[in-house]
Image: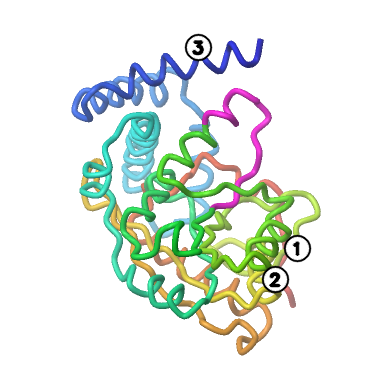
Amino acid sequence: MNDLGYRITLALLYALALLPMRVLYVLSDFLYLIVYHVARYRRKLVRENLAACFPDKNETDRRDIEKKFYRNFTDYIVETVKLLHISDAEIKRRMQFENIELIDRLTAEGRSVVIYFSHCGNWEWATSMTLHVRHDADSHVEYCQVYRPLRSEITDRLMLRLRSRFGSLSFPKSSVLRDLIKLRRNGVTSVTGFMSDQKPSHGDPTVVTTLLNRPTAMISGTETLARKLDMAVIYWDMEKPGRGRYRLTCRLICENPAEMPGHSITLSYAAMLQETIERNPSIWLWTHNRWKYPVQLPS
C-alpha cells in the first residue's frame, strides 16, 4: 500500500511540476491565504519566536516579517515540487553560487569539505550545486547532504528523490560518519552539506551560545566530524534577491580544523547564521520550534 501511495503521490506532484513557474506562484499565493489566514499554521509559534529574537523591533515590523515569511514558505513548497520537472538551465538561472571556486580549489587539492547550511530561502534547490562545480562524479568527487529520515515513508521517499535530482548522495544523520569514512577509503573526495540550525535531537552533542538574543544549543557534531576527518569547513550564506531567485555565497570558516580552538567552528557558524537571518529575517524557517527546550549560557 505504501508503494501504491508513493506512486500516486508522485504522479500528482509531477503533474503540478509540469506547470510553468508563473502558474506555480499563483498557486503559492493561494496557499499563502490558506496557510496563513485560514489554517493559521503555527502562527502563535512564529510570533513568539519573532518577539523573542527581535525585541527591538515594533509589532508592525515583526508582523511584516511574519507575513513575508509565510509567503516565502509557500513559495518554498511549490518550488520544491518543481524539482520534479525543471531543466538544468532554468535552475542555474534561478540558483546562483558565488565563490564556488573555493570548493573547486579544495577538491582539486584532494580536500574533503563540510558545508554548514541552514533552513533559509529554498535549501532544497541548493543541491543544484553540482551544475556549477568543476568536478563531477567521474573525477572521484561526490557531493552529498545529511538528512533526518522522516516518519512518513512516502514523504521520505519523495524527498530523497528530489534531493538526488542533480546527482548528489543523501546520508542519514545516524550513519554519515561511517558513510564518509567509506568514501575516503575508496579514494573519493566528498563535499557534504549539514543543516545545523535545527533543534538538537535527544543525545546530540551541543555547545550553548547566544543566537538572535536567545541562549541556544547549537549542534556541535558537525564540527566534531570535520575535526575527525580533517575536512575543510565552509558556510553557505543564503540570499533571496527576488521571487524564485536565490544566491549562495561560499564563505570559508577554516581549511584546517585542527588549528581551530575547541567549539570555535560551531560558534563561527552561529555568528554567520545570525548575520544571514538579520539581513533578511523572512527567509528563515520560523515555524521550526528551535527553542523548544530552554538552555542556560555557561557561566
Q: Residue 224's mark?
A: 2
Give residue 239's position: percent from left, percent from top. Answer: 31, 56
Magenta stretch: give its range: 145-158
Q: In this view, does 17 lie above or below 237?
A: above
**Residue at the image point whose x is 32% and y is 29% from the top:** 85
- Side (left or right) of 193 relative to 11: right
Earlier in the chain: of badge 3 and badge 2, it is 3
Q: Label 1: few (<14), some or many (≥20) within 10 Å?
A: some
Earlier in the chain: of badge 2 and badge 1, it is 1
Q: Say what secondary structure mark 1 lies in.
A: loop
* Amino acid type, residue under disc 1 in the picture: Pro
For this orientation, the residue located farthest to the front is: 138
Q: Which of 143 and 250 is in front in this view?
A: 143
Q: Residue 24's mark?
A: none
Name the residue that disc number 1 marks.
205
Give residue 288's position: percent from left, percent from top. Answer: 56, 42
Whether the magenta-drawn stretch holds residue 154 is answered as: yes
Q: Do the residues labelled 2 and 1 touch (CB within 8 Å)?
A: yes
Label 1 to label 3, Cα distance in Å?
A: 40 Å
User: The N terminus lies in which quarter of the figure?
Assistant: top right
Label 2 to label 1, Cα distance in Å?
A: 9 Å
Name the residue that disc number 3 marks.
8
* Amino acid type, residue under disc 3 in the picture: Ile
